[in-house]
Amino acid sequence: MEDHKAQFIDVKQIVKVLWQKRKVYLYVMLISFVLSCIWIFPQPRYYDCEVTLAPESNGESVSGGLSSIASSFGFNLGDMAGNDAIYPTLYPDLFESPEFLVGLFDIKIRTLDGEISTDYYTYLKEDQKQSVLTLPFRTLSNYINSLFESEEQRGKSSEGEKINSFLLSKKDYMLMESMKEKISCSVDKRTDVISISVRDQDALVCAMMADSVKEHLQNFIIQYRTSKARQDCDYYQHLTDSAKIEYEEALRLYTEYCDTHKDVILQAFISERDKLENDMSMKYSTYSAMNTQLQAMKAKVQERTPSFTTLKSATVPVKPSGPKRMIFVVGVLFFVSFIFIVYQLKGVLWKI
């Protein structure tokens, strides 16, 4: 019977223990409050901006009923039926590609106060606000890294030099990694709606980058989708230009021959004239055929160019997204309270 009673929690004893430690608890909470405020308030504010767009679907038609059933399970049969190697569900993977990310470094931005107007690369490198509390740690870390950094690594990111995505310096690689944390992309597998989110310390830079990343993604996809058609177009443009030159040369020879042999009735001259005329006609037929193919290829480039419908455009955020200072302070106080209570009641809880 005694063992059974020992299993119950003595609420009076718990209250008594906590009441005896109330002054210690108040001191602990006051210190936790001050320390949490000292830590969170110097942290720079940041803003979030999101744009959404829907790409044109060019996949082969799939049975509507089967496609709807597949969509309910998170599959898109339209993408699987298409011939593209890059379809909407793979767009987020582009944001892991160094070639795609390095292309964002050249985007021109400016801050809301107008004090900074530069490219995104310089902005990330030189104009990021940092908490003063972490300054000693950053200084020490930079000093230690400089001791192990070779001269070759230091010289790869020179001013005015175009960044090579194939051979990045360590500093450029770290900037690219930090940019990955600021820019993200997600795709709804059911609707193929693309969402692009950008986080930054300045509201205007955040909105400008969201809109620019959207344009960069669209141009990247358009370049991919039309690459084969544009190559065919360039090829037929070359054939058309060559055929035109040959036709104009044949026309010139025929015209000159006719002008210099107006009243000639000898069969040899007439045969030569007919030969030049036939050659000119053949060259014109070739030129006409190549020009027709060229126009068809230009139409195909336009046909292959995808369209995007912007569902939610970029707007300059009014309120910062974080850090949530009050939530952080309350969370710290709650966590400290939990630890304090468990520590003070460890003797009582151990007997249960």
Image (cartoon, grey):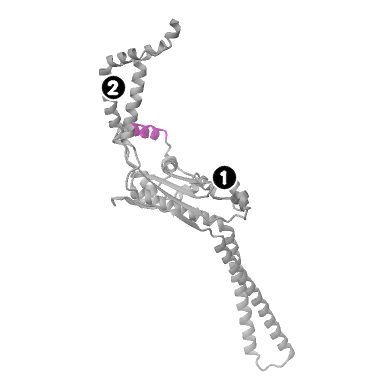
Residue 340 is at least partly visible in this image: yes
Chief secondary structure of the magenta portion: helix
Q: Which quarter of the rendering shows the N terminus? A: top left
Q: Nearer the viewer, residue 183 or 31?
A: 31
In terms of image quadrants, where is residue 244? Answer: bottom right
Q: Residue furthest top?
A: 2
- On the image, the x and y values in percent for residue 207 come to 37, 50
Q: Which residues are magenta?
A: 137-148
Q: Is residue 220 magenta?
A: no
For this view, does 243 lie left or right of residue 271? left
In terms of image quadrants, where is residue 59? Answer: bottom right
Quickly name the residue at label 2. Answer: 28
Which residue lies at the image location 42% right of the left edge and 36% below the top edge? 149
Q: Is residue 145 magenta?
A: yes
Of the residues shown, which amino acid type is indicated by label 2? Val
Q: Spatial distance from mark 1 to mark 2, Cα to Cα?
A: 52 Å
Which residue lies at the image location 52% right of the left edge and 45% below the top edge? 93
- On the image, the x and y values in percent for residue 12 come to 33, 13
